[in-house]
Every structure is written in C-alpha cells, then in structure tokens.
Amino acid sequence: MKSHSTAGFGTKAIHAGQSPDPSTGAIMTPVYMTSTYVQEAPAKTKGYDYSRSHNPTRTAMEQNLAALEGGAFGLGFASGMAAIHCVLNLLQAGDHVIAGNDLYGGTYRILKTLYAKFGLETTFVDLTDLQQLEAAFRPNTKLVMLETPTNPLLRCCDLRALAKICKRHKVLSMADNTFATPYLQNPLALGCDIVVHSTTKYLGGHSDVVGGVLVSDDAELHKRLAHFQNSCGGTPGPMDCFLVLRGTKTLHVRMERHCENALQVAKWLSAHPRVERVLYPGLPSHPNHAIAKRQMRAGGGMVSVELKATVAQAKKVCSSFGVFSLAESLGGVESLVDHPASMTHASIPAEERRRSGLQDGLIRLSVGIEDADDLVADLDQALRRLR
Ligand SMILES: *Cc1c(COP(=O)(O)O)cnc(C)c1O
C-alpha cells in the first residue's frame, strides 16, 4: 500500500510504505541485509544499486514516516543527531541560525562545539516569546530550529505563528517533533518546512534502536537533503529500519496510553507537598496549555517535575524508584526517570541552564504504558525519601 492520503492515522501507521513481499507474500517488510544489488546490464537496476544510497527496508520506513507526518519525502538516518546534522549542512560559513533556548542537549552541543568553528553563528531564544524571535533575525539568518514541547521544560511554542514569521523572513523552519510524535502533532501541516525525529524515542518505542528521520514536502529541499544523506552516509541499517517500522505499527495505540498515564501522574504530582511545579502541557496550569491544546491531540507522555529539593536530594529520589528506571532517553514502553542537570543536559553550563529555567531539582519522567496505579505508587514511595 503506497497512497494513504485519505486513510486514518492508525491505518497509515500499519500500512503506509509497505506491501507484501512480491516474491513470497511475506506480510512483513523483509530486512534486506545486502550492500549491493545485481544489475541486469550496466546501470540497468530495479531502483537499487548500493545500500548507502537506498535500501528497500529503508525505503519502506522513509515512506511510512513521511505518510505519518503528512509530507511527501522521508529520509532515514542512523540517529536523530545525524538527521539534524544533515539539516545544518544546508547552511554555509557566515550563515546565522536561531534556535530555541531549551533544545535537546545534543542539538545545543552540535551548534556550540562543532558548527560554531565552521563560522555558523547561533542565537538561542525563548521561542514561546514571538517578539524575542522577531528581534533575533539578521540579514544572514537562514534557519530557525525549534522543538515543541521542549526538552526538558515542555514549553510549547505556537507552530503556526512561528512558521508564518519564518516564511515572511524567507527563512527555513525545522521542527523537532520527537516529543510530540506525528500522532499528536504535525508541524508540516502548520507551515514548517522540515520535521525531524529521533526515531530512537516514541517511533521505535521499545528502547531497542537508535535512528533518525527527516520529513519534508518540497521537492527541491528534499533533493538537497538527500544529496547530503547519500554523500555523507549517516544512514541506518536495514535491521534498524525494520525495528522502527515495527514500532510505528502500534504508535497510535501506545501514544493513547502514554498520554493517559502521563495525565494521571501529572495530576497526582500536582497535589504533592514536596512538588514545587509540575510541567505537563496537558494540565490547564501549564503556561502554554492553550497552544498545546490547539496544536496537539493530547499532552504527550513526558512529565517534568520541579521538586522542593537540592541536587543531592533530587539525585537520591531518582535512585529510589522500583518501576521507573534511571536512564537517559525516553519514549519506550517502560517508564524512565532522568535528572537533566546531571544527565541529559550536563553539557550545558550550569549558569546557562538555570537562566533558561532548568532548575537543579527538576526531574523528567518518560511515562511508560505500565499500569498507571503502579507508576503513582512508585512515585509515592520515591518522594517519601524527601521527608
Ligand atoms: C534524543 C533526541 C535527539 C537526538 O536523537 P538521537 O537518536 O539520540 O541521535 C534529538 N532531539 C530530541 C528532542 C531528542 O529527544
């Protein structure tokens, strides 16, 4: 099945980009473990000549993810960072980038420690404040990089408004949709140019694969991105693509449960005496709740909590869970807890971290699809360590 423009999300998730194997009828896309392809005559191929350039399992994954994001073109990468790296290669020395000020730590790091030395300048701004964004544009601005909800503060910026501003300035917009997933939010439909995912997270969904993808809807832009993908070769292997394809088949079902559980956990935490603040876009108390409600189907599976705790106490809580596992990453079926200040966001200098609102006592929960009552009971016993 190739064209699913009118089908519902669940039908696309299961079928888009995939059809039974023509030689055997196998319903699952085979894992094409091959580097090269036999040609009938020189340059006479069946569309495949070398697996860095194209591989049938990857093609199925790319088409599946493009369909889920409502874009025409998908490109698979060996990681989310490889995908982001590809987008940055649209630029050249002397160009200027505007990026959100609480981006994924690795995105911050690639801009600060790698691209800066090639003459790419970045201004980090709070993208929930459109005036800050407007003020940051320069004549040489070429790209705006955004995430919504952000990591780990779960701020939500207005995708439609942001995309409109970027279009007026003739600047590309790239939305990292990893936290929301295409089930909850579709940035291309709201006017963004490129969607990026770390498929390592919800799309894979089972904590067993690292990968990334770019989706775009403009043939010329896709051509430039594809040229880089083929030239530099940060492409995923067929087994990785198979795992992501297997993951997306249940994305809609998993996301429903992630969101239900996260809402229950967020509500319970909001009433806890040792909790300073719960950051969850699905709660009316969230500062960007109205925007989230407008552009997301539900609040997502991530919940961040500011504990009334010192760094040492927050670390102790993080080590006291029975069901939640202390680990980086997110989006798998199992619940994880992270202490951003000492784990995922440790590469951001402490001063800068605090300035952007990331407190030392903040813990980030990736709420899994276990029984919500067990998750709440686990939080209850862990937070008792604070007494
Ligand atoms: C994990 C993550 C990335 C990086 O993806 P990798 O697959 O780890 O390279 C980028 N953006 C966000 C929001 C992420 O959570």
Image (cartoon, rainbow, N blue to C red):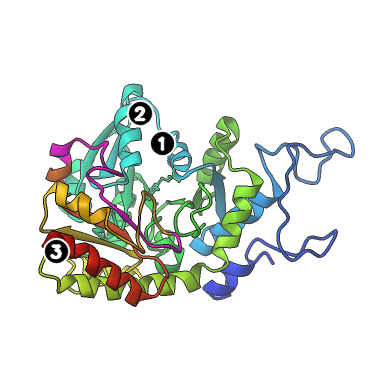
Q: Which residue is mark 3?
A: 277
Q: Position of residue 307 (x, y in %)?
A: 15, 59
Mark closer to the chain start, 1 or 3 = 1
- Left or right of 340: which side holds 328? right
Examine the rendering and report whether any part of residue 297 can be seen: no
Examine the rendering and report whether any part of residue 3 can be seen: yes
> Between residues 339 and 223, which one lies in front from this camera angle?
339
Q: Position of residue 60 (x, y in %)?
A: 65, 55
Give the magenta range.
Answer: 332-352
Q: Quadrant of the C terminus?
A: bottom left
| Mark 1 vs mark 3: in front | 3
Which residue is painted at 82% across and 35% down in the image? 43
Mark closer to the chain start, 1 or 2 = 1
Q: Residues within 10 Å of mark 1 (few under 14, many from 20)?
A: some
- Left or right of 182: which side holds 114? left
Contact? badges 1 and 2 (CB < 8 Å): yes
Say which element carries label 3.
strand
| Mark 2 vs mark 3: in front | 3
Q: Position of residue 364 (x, y in %)?
A: 27, 56
Under mark 2, the amino acid is Tyr
Give the CA distance from mark 1 to mark 2: 8 Å
Under mark 1, the amino acid is Leu
95 above or below 271?
above
> Between residues 86 and 77, which one lies in front from this camera angle?
77
Under mark 3, the amino acid is Arg
Q: Position of residue 63 (x, y in %)?
A: 61, 57
Mark closer to the chain start, 2 or 3 = 2
Say which element carries label 1.
helix
Q: Quadrant of residue 233?
A: top right
Kindly give the residue lying farthest to the right in the view shown.
40
Q: Which residue is mark 2?
A: 115
Q: Which residue is mark 1?
A: 88
